Every structure is written in C-alpha cells, then in structure tokens.
Amino acid sequence: MTATNSAATVRRAGPDDCGRLSALLIEAFAFYGDPQPLPASEIAERLRRRIDQEPGFEALVAERNGLPVGFAIYAPVFWTTDCELALFLKEIYVTDAARGDGVGRALMTEMARTAAERGWTRLVWTVDRFNRRAIRFYKSLPGLRILDKNVFLITGEDLAKLAKEG
C-alpha cells in the first residue's frame, strides 16, 4: 500500500525501518520537549521486536527523495460501541521541513485506507491539547468528532504498586 502526493510517498514500515523510526521518534521527543528515554539503538531494537507482531504495532513511513520525513505508529483496538476493531493511532510525526506539505494528510489517508480495507470501523487518536497546529490539522479532516474524554496513565513503580493490590 503506497500513497503518493507531491510531498511524499507513504509506505508500510518493516523491521528494516526501525533505525529510521527511532531517529524520527527521537526528533518527535525533542519537538514535544520530552527527554529521550533510551539510547537510539535500544529504541530501534524495541521497535524491531514489536513491529508487525501480535501484540505489537504497525507503522507507516513517509519519504521524500528517499529520506524519511514522517511516520505514524498504530495498532488495532477493540471498540465497545460497536464491538468492532478500530485503528488506534498512537503517534504521528512530520519533520519540521515537511510540515504543511501534505505529509500528515498522506499518512492519515493511508491509515484510513488500512482501516477500511480491514473492515475496522474507526480511526481514533489523542492529541496534546496545547498542540494547536495539530488540532487545526485534525479539524481539517472529514467527519472528525472530538470526544470529551480524558486520557489517564499509570506507569513504572505506580503500575507495579497497583498490580500488587488486593
């Protein structure tokens, strides 16, 4: 599956792309002001262990002139409203040089195609409420519904502590 526009070619990522995905993830961490959690080689290895696995994730890479300019990482999630699978977009990122060139739209279009081809009924994601540029972009997509939900997260020692209760 390849989506092409004047900005980039979008293709399904595989294990050989994990080094490129790692570099783009590190760039995304910096963009959001987050510290890099692991060395690049460890990020790439962890991606390699889970890409296209059950459980795991799938990814798309957007390239321009053979160089990566964006990615999307997604996985199926069971949606209880209709008891069907939905495509859950975990992360999408477009490099600064490619922003505004249609790369994000090409990535979203390819994910929509993937969901439709598989009979998945929704494309679902979250966005940082302070990322105004991303919110403007998402609002340009057809049929967008903004859900009034909060996202919660428990991790690390707190996750272990909760797991030991009871």
Image: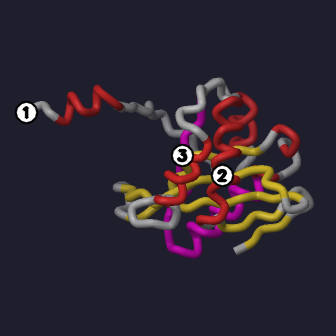
Which residue is rendered at x = 85% and y = 62% of the image? 66
Mark 2 residue element: helix
Which residue is rendered at x = 75% and y = 72% of the image? 2
Residue ID for mark 2: 21
Q: Residues within 10 Å of mark 3 (few under 14, many from 20)?
A: few
Where residue 60 appears, as percent x and y from the top left, is 66, 60
Which residue is rendered at x = 58% and y = 70% of the image? 116
Instruction: Name the side, left or right, on which 140 lies relative to 152.
Output: right
Labels 2, 1: front one: 2
Residue ID for mark 3: 42
Q: CA distance from mark 2 to mark 3?
A: 12 Å
Magenta residues, start to end: 105-128
Residue 85, image quadrant? bottom left
- Mark 3 / mark 1, whichever is N-terminal: 3
Q: Is residue 15 visible?
A: yes
Q: Is residue 122 visible?
A: no
Residue ID for mark 1: 166
Where residue 118 appears, as percent x and y from the top left, is 52, 74
